[in-house]
Amino acid sequence: MKTPIYLDYNATTPVAPEVVDAIRPFLVEHFGNPSSSHVYGLVARQAVAEARASVAELIHAKQGEIVFTGSATEANNLALLGVARALGQTKRHLVVSAIEHPAVMQPAQHLREMGWDLTVVAVDGYGRVDPHAVAAAVRPDTGLVSIMHANNEVGTIQSIAEIARLVKPMGVLLHTDAAQSAGKVELDVDALGVDLLTLAGHKFYATKGVGALYVRTGTPITPILFGADQEHGLRPGTENVPLVVGMGAAARLAREHLPAATEKLRALRDALHERLAAAVPGLVLNGHPTERLPNTLHVSFPGISGRELLYRVAGRVAASVGSACHSEADAVSGVLIKPLAIRLGEQTTLAKSLVMAAMGCDADRARGAVRLSMGWVTTLEEIEAAATAISEGVTDLLVRRR
Amino acid sequence: MKTPIYLDYNATTPVAPEVVDAIRPFLVEHFGNPSSSHVYGLVARQAVAEARASVAELIHAKQGEIVFTGSATEANNLALLGVARALGQTKRHLVVSAIEHPAVMQPAQHLREMGWDLTVVAVDGYGRVDPHAVAAAVRPDTGLVSIMHANNEVGTIQSIAEIARLVKPMGVLLHTDAAQSAGKVELDVDALGVDLLTLAGHKFYATKGVGALYVRTGTPITPILFGADQEHGLRPGTENVPLVVGMGAAARLAREHLPAATEKLRALRDALHERLAAAVPGLVLNGHPTERLPNTLHVSFPGISGRELLYRVAGRVAASVGSACHSEADAVSGVLIKPLAIRLGEQTTLAKSLVMAAMGCDADRARGAVRLSMGWVTTLEEIEAAATAISEGVTDLLVRRR
């Protein structure tokens, strides 16, 4: 059976062959525990150190500033809950954007239950937060600002550097969830001006099961899991040597691929957009027209359900409706956003789907949304075939309706 | 260069070839995100479900009772902190043994900082807790009892079933850290009578970076990391599909290998013990003579340092001093036990090394300790060569001293 064209790279990427090659020896001959004093341990220890250096280099950080975790979700939890624990009773106010991933929004909600105050900054119709609105939300008791770098659904990229320029002088810590950015756009922790940054292995051709948190030297943070002293004492448990090594290899690849990959992805994305726009009158682009991930095309098909469309073309194209702009009639797919009761105010919103509320989509646009995300190995032939399949699917659904 | 004979299977095992074979397709063609609705997601979802069933079967649990985590450390944290959160303010007393792994002892210490009361039950000279002492420690406000199944250092196995028989009628939850037991001895959650049980992939021929927590149906527990709703809502983050599949394959292997593997390991262990005892007058066995992991030989060499001995034979044998019975002069190796200030009383101990204090070893016995742990692929030839190497190392050290 022919497998459908994969256009869901924002959900997860395949593992690059170079990464598989890097992992294999650490499944077989180099199986030692990095904590062991003998040669088996030494080899594992050195491999983890090299991977740490490689991931650090990808984001222009120092080796000692990288903490490997089991996922980006865990890295986000460590950033929010670990900083909160370290700050203690002095700073108990957190600022996030309205379109954070549940892996930020849920720890934020947990902190609220623990007595923290939470401000959720709204986004505009393109899914962008206004850096000045973020700065306006900062108070004397603000401990941490956490604004995602690129949105997983619509792909909109935030002005983190501008946010940093405004809020860092106010004495707050700044975290950004860059799980969707690494390997797609250049990342530089100094240019971004962040104290903490989250990476996800399986979003840039490493594997699921490994993530990392960048922690700028001097940032107050404590572990959130407790045990032995691995990862500079910040994340206990025997190191996941094979997948950490894989993430190091993926970071090397990403450095080599960028910025050429960015250009290639942008061209493919725009080619798909043009073909769909030509075939489907009234097609609406979601997310920012330019400040957007080069691989992400999030569009709404007028008058049909994105979910039904994907079901109809399932044999030819594999993509996602995302959880963005979903309507009440269409259940949340992929990422689950739990109902979040947050303090209502000028800069806050209460919604089942934060992204839907935040971007102010109407019901039809919400219902018709589909996320098409491309990867390094996506070809123009795949894009053309996908555009044909989706256009035919749209026609079929509209015809069937009459 | 010839690699030394590996006798440190309690630190970590190599990955079984069958496990590597099971993992590979999930690094390459089956790379989907289990949360995706399309066929790539479906394949990943089914693979995780099969792995869950396989791990459940290993310990005679139901599929829905297995929560995959990033490590046994995380599973232990989830057991202790997740149950503590679920119990809220009603039950705020925890009972552990004096020889728990840091992945239990440190979360226990964290709970103490959060206002829980902690009782540490002493062990005898063999490293065994008296089930009646555990029962005596239970109070009306006791929420959880956590006693490890097999000690990672000396290998002593606790009478968990007997502890369950005594404490379960008192209305407490019972957790056991079985990270060192799976694949070495039969495990049955009903026979053990536990509510929660921890497994570590890399201790039974799966990989580092994956663990699991058995949670008996109906056990009050909440997540300790926050995000989307994976793992029955108990552990957020995209599933680590390849390593979870690997752990499923390892569980199948363990079922096939047991109980023959137990018998083989015991014979190798006792052969090594006999050879060393014959060559080294005054050799002392640590841990229980019979109620002990079949693969673990923890012995003290009189008059020499275990660390120096391992250093001397490093080219021929790779083993560990463990953190058991270490002296002040020899730094803690492998597992780090942080200083733990606990409530002193009849059933508690205050010590830098809990195992040393608990087993009442004198300084010489502590200094001379070495842990030799065997695995499925260990051969009698390796045992004979290791015994020769170690005996020669002991002689060299004693001669040099004169």
Image: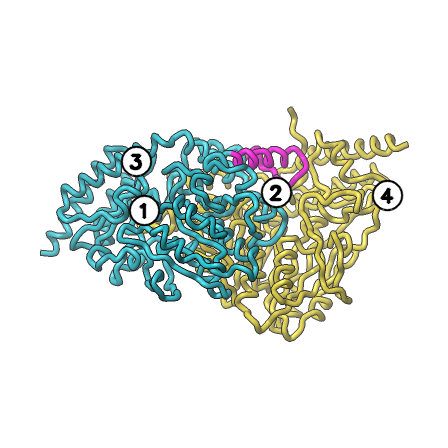
Chain colours: A yellow, B cyan
- Whether pointer 4 and pointer 2 mark residues with C-beta atoms closer than 8 Å, the reply is no
Which of the two residues, A13 or A139, is positioned nearer the viewer here? A139
Residue farthest along the bottom direction in this orientation: A140
Q: Residue at x 60, y 51 (%)?
A: A179
Q: State the residue position of label 1.
A: B156
| Chain to which mark 4 belongs | A
Looking at the picture, which amino acid does disc 4 mark?
A: Gly
Gap in Å between the C-alphas at discs 2 and 3?
42 Å
| Chain to which mark 1 belongs | B
Q: Position of residue B104 (x, y in %)?
A: 43, 54
Secondary structure state at the residue bearing disc 1? loop
Secondary structure state at the residue bearing disc 3? helix
Q: 10 Å neighbourhood of mark 4: few (<14), some, or many (≥20)?
A: few
Gap in Å between the C-alphas at discs 4 and 2?
29 Å
Looking at the picture, which amino acid does disc 1 mark?
A: Thr
Which of discs 1 and 4 lies nearer the camera? The answer is: 1
Q: Residue at x 52, y 67 (%)?
A: A86
- Which mark is drawn over residue B265? 3
Same chain for mark 1 and mark 4? The answer is: no
Q: State the residue position of label 2.
A: A12
| Chain to which mark 3 belongs | B
Which of discs 3 and 1 lies nearer the camera? The answer is: 1
The quarter in which the C terminus of chain B is drawn is bottom left
Q: Residue at x 61, y 39 (%)?
A: B34
Q: Height in image: A331 above or below B326?
A: above
Q: State the residue position of label 4.
A: A282
Which of the two residues, B81 or A365, is positioned nearer the viewer here? B81
Q: 10 Å neighbourhood of mark 2: few (<14), some, or many (≥20)?
A: many
Secondary structure state at the residue bearing disc 4? loop
